[in-house]
Amino acid sequence: MVFAVDQSPRALRTVRRRAAALALRNVCVGSSLLEVLTNLNGRPCDFILLYDMLHFLDLRERRELYSGLHNVLAANGRLSVHLTHVKDNDPDGHFAKMTVDDGVREIEMAGFCRVGKIPARVWHSYGAVDSLIWSFVKRSYF
Ligand SMILES: C[S@@+](CC[C@H](N)C(=O)[O-])C[C@H]1O[C@@H](n2cnc3c(N)ncnc32)[C@H](O)[C@@H]1O
């Protein structure tokens, strides 16, 4: 199953529409992480993507998110993160004064261990850009 979370009803409608157009039956959408975690019924997640969204959350909200994700990520699962709008790259939101390294360190401090830094061409805002995708596993002794 794929669970897509976004607070924007418009974004959720787009996901539903595209999933339907591709006849995908394994995509669930929800507006809050709590709602989606409830739907998981204790099943672990193999792969979690946080792409271009952490800068919307303040530190308390990010810590809550990391903690919730730490609980549901499978022991050998991956947390994949696209850190955007940091200090030296189109600064915005709660990351405007943080560097990418600050963001990575924050995730590590929340109980994850960095296992990869992958150069990738990803969609951002209105076009494809060369960027980095950070990959984490959870530290089991956290
Ligand atoms: C810049 S978009 C990126 C969307 C997508 N992850 C991507 O990479 O194309 C950020 C999205 O995060 C959503 N968002 C921001 N704060 C949120 C929150 N607290 N809970 C859920 N979604 C949130 C916004 O509605 C927006 O659609």
Image (cartoon, rainbow, N blue to C red):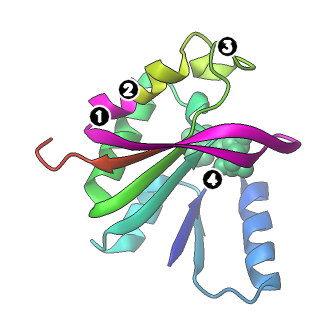
Q: Is mark 4 within 8 Å of ligand 1?
A: yes
Separation (CA) of disc 1 from disc 4: 22 Å
Separation (CA) of disc 3 from disc 1: 23 Å
Q: Can residue 73 be seen in this view?
A: no
Q: Nearer the viewer, mark 3 or mark 2?
A: 3
Name the N-terminal-most of marks 1 and 4.
4
Q: What's drawn in magenta, residue-wise?
A: 105-134
Q: Do the residues labelled 1 and 2 touch (CB within 8 Å)?
A: yes
Considering the image in quadrants, where does the C terminus appear?
Answer: top left
Name the N-terminal-most of marks 4 and 3.
4
Name the residue tied to disc 2.
106
Q: How crowded is mark 2: few (under 14 residues within 10 Å), some or many (20 or more)?
A: some
List the single residue furthest toward the left.
141
Separation (CA) of disc 4 from disc 2: 22 Å
123 relative to 71 in the view: left or right:
right
**Residue 110 disc label:** 1
Q: SS class of the residue under badge 2?
A: helix
Q: Which amino acid does label 2 sit on?
A: Glu
